[in-house]
Structures are given as C-alpha cells and as structure tokens.
C-alpha cells in the first residue's frame, strides 16, 4: 500500500511538469515559426521614416545641384573678384608695412589699375574701332585676293580639286558679310543686346566685389578662422595668409606676362604688316591670362590671320612667336614668378579645360588661381604631414 501510494504521488507530481513542458515546447515552436515567417515591410519599425528621410535627402541633393547650376555665373563672378582682390594684396601689404592704413593701400592700388586701364583703353579703343571698320570694308577684296594668291592656286592644282576658287570665295564672303546672316549667327538683335548688357553688368559686379574683398580680406579671414579649433587656429591663419599672398603674386605676375605678350604681338604684327595688330594684341593679352592653352589658341588665330598677307609672312610671324614663347617660358616667367608658387603645366591644362567646360572663359580664368591655391595647400599641409608619418 505504501508503494502504490508513493507511485501515485510521483505521477501527480510529474504530470503537471510534463504538461507545462509541452506548453513551453509549443510556445517556443510558435515563436520560432513567427521568427522564420517574413515580416511585412509596413510592420518593420522605422521603415516609413527611413524611406521618407531618404526621399527628402535625395530631393534636397537635387535641389542643391539645380541651385548651384543656376548660380554658376554668379559664383564665377565672385571667384574672379576674389582672385583679383588677391592680386592687389602684395601692393596693399607693402604699403601697410610703410605705415599706411589698409584702405589707403587698396585705394592706391585701384587708382593705379584704373589709370592703367583707362590709359590703355584711350589708346587702344580708337585704333581698334578703326581697324575693325577697315577689316569690314576691305574684307570682300581681301577674300578675293586670297583666291588669286599663287599658293592657293597651286594647292588646288596639287590636290586635284575641281572647284572654282573665285565662286567659293564669293559665296563665303556674301554669306559672312550679309548683316542678316551675322545677326542670325549672333542669335538676333535681342541676343546681341542682351550679351552686351550682360557683359557690362558682369564688369560692374566684379569691380564692386573686387573692391569689397580687397578692403575686408583680413576681417573675412578672422571670421572664418573662428570655425577652426583654437589649438590649430594660428597655423591655419598662417597657411591661409601664405595661400592668399602666393595666389595674389601669381595673378599679378600672370597679368604682367600677359601685358608683355600683348605688346610683343603688337610690335611684331606692326613690323610684319599683319592685319589689325591692336585687335590681335588684345586677343594675345586675354589668351595669355590662361597659361599654355590660351596662348597657343591666340597664336594659332594670329598666324592664320597673317595668311591673308602671304604664307611667308605667316611663317615668319609663327617662328618669331614660337621663339618668344620659349623666351617667356625660360626667362621671363621664372623672373616674374620667382616669389609665386610654381604650378605644373599639366595641372594648368587640366584646370583650364575643366574651368572652361564649367564656366566658359571666366571659368578658365578662375580655375587657374584655384589650382594654384590647391598646390599651396598640398605643399604646406599635405606634404609636411606625410613626412611625419
């Protein structure tokens, strides 16, 4: 009896535990099945919020890109004005060391530049207008003379071209000298007027921004330095100051080289009897502001234009300009740019093409000083840091 009573008590004590074990097993099976079962995207926590933030972020990025594209012209104006202000910096600092206030140095620099510009325009514009008018008046006769040049006739015979050179030249001249055709090529009267207005507006905006940047450059630098930790602020200020001074010297030196280039082209074309020497001197000045690329393009146009005089004249002018380019590269540039940072030629070409693709001629002009600043940052920040590793 005692044994049977003990067996019944054991069965009673084990029965509930078995039931609870079965219940635990079934619940763990359900939880495992629920975990294995793929959850709906709508039931995942934060899915809607993640999608909304991603959509808003993408839209914001597209909006920023569109805004930058719309403001690209204004940004180019700002960059050009800033680098022109840096060109005044060496003169302003020299006057500041002599005890003059900064605004006096800026005023003196601007007066000197304006005086030089006004003097050059007063001397160049009347001759330029006269020469352009002469080109327009004599263009038909000049084109006819080209067709009668012996070297043109010989080239046609050598190549075996069955073409009437006189008729071809007459068709080209009648097309190019038709006022309606010229306006159509320029986009119409409205487009030409709009282009002139935009050019005048750009000059005014750049001039005002240049004066503002030249006067307030130290205050701008101090305000921007507040975003740098105090422990690195002094070094950042020194490097920024060196960048501004080096870029300013580079811009001023490039303008000086462009002026020398323009004077040389004017003298060569005047001696050789080339067409419109004042116009091509101005073209050489603008081309020399874009090193390597601009000079090559300007020289190619000048040599092609001297073909209207004679092939011998074009060859002589081309040889003289090539010799001058070598003298400028190996004699003038090292002397003028002795205190400026040296920019590799490959970097100049890449920057000029990239800036031209983004912002046209103004973009190419701005891209060179930006590349110069990048070289200074590389030499003063990246290289010393890598030497310590």
Image (tube, rainbow, N blue to C red):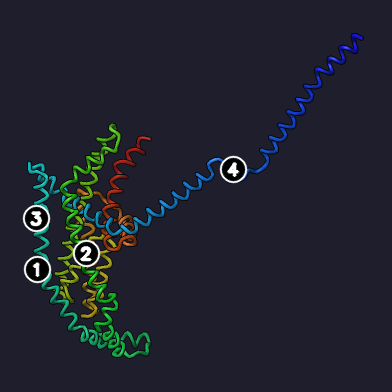
Q: Read off the residue under disc 4.
A: 43
- Position of 159 compared to 299: left or right? right
Q: Earlier in the sequence, mark 2 or mark 4?
A: 4
Q: Are marks 1 and 2 in contact (CB under 8 Å)?
A: no
The residue that appears at 19% across and 61% down in the rendered structure is 203
| Position in image of residue 356 (x %, y %) | 31, 62
The residue that appears at 26% across and 82% down in the rendered structure is 180
| Residue closer to the observer: 217 or 141 | 217
Which callout, 3 or 1, points to the residue nearer the camera? 3
Crowd tier of the residue under label 4, counting other residues whose Cα lies within 10 Å: few below 14, some 14–19, many 20 or above:
few
Q: Earlier in the sequence, mark 3 or mark 4?
A: 4
Quarter that holds the N terminus: top right
Q: Read off the residue under disc 1.
A: 123
Distance between the Cα atoms at labels 3 and 1? Answer: 18 Å
Q: Residue furthest top?
A: 2
- Is the residue 20 above or below the residue 130 in the image? above
């Amino acid at each position: 009896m005692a044994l049977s009573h003990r067996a019944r008590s054991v069965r009673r004590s084990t029965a509930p535990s078995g039931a609870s074990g079965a219940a635990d097993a079934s619940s763990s099976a359900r939880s495992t099945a629920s975990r294995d079962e793929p959850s709906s995207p709508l039931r995942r926590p934060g899915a809607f919020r993640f999608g909304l933030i991603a959509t808003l972020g993408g839209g914001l990025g597209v909006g920023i890109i569109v805004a930058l594209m719309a403001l690209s012209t204004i940004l180019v104006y700002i960059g050009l004005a800033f680098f022109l202000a840096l060109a005044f910096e060496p003169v302003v600092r020299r006057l500041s060391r002599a005890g003059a206030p900064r605004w006096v140095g800026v005023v003196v620099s601007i007066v000197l530049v304006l005086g030089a510009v006004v003097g050059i325009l007063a001397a160049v514009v009347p001759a330029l207008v006269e020469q352009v008018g002469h080109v327009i008046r004599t263009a038909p006769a000049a084109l006819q003379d080209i067709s009668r040049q012996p070297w043109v006739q010989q080239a046609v015979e050598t190549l075996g071209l069955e073409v009437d050179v006189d008729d071809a030249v007459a068709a080209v001249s009648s097309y190019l000298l038709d006022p309606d055709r010229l306006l159509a090529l320029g986009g119409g009267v409205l487009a030409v007027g709009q282009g002139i207005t935009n050019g005048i507006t750009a000059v005014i905006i750049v001039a005002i921004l240049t004066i503002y940047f030249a006067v307030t450059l130290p205050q701008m630098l101090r305000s921007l330095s507040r975003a740098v930790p105090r422990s690195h602020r002094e070094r950042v200020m020194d490097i920024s100051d060196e960048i501004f001074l080096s870029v300013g010297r580079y811009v001023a030196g490039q303008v000086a080289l462009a002026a020398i280039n323009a004077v040389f082209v004017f003298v060569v074309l005047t001696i050789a009897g080339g067409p419109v020497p004042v116009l091509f001197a101005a073209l050489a000045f603008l081309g020399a502001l874009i090193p390597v690329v601009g000079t090559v393009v300007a020289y190619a146009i000048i040599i092609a234009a001297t073909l209207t005089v004679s092939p011998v004249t074009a060859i002589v002018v081309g040889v003289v300009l090539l010799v001058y380019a070598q003298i400028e590269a190996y004699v003038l540039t090292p002397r003028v740019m002795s205190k400026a940072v040296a920019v590799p030629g490959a970097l100049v070409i890449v920057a000029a093409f990239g800036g031209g693709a983004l912002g046209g001629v103004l973009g190419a002009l701005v891209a060179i000083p930006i590349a110069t600043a990048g070289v200074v940052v590389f030499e003063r920040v990246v290289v010393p840091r890598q030497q310590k590793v």
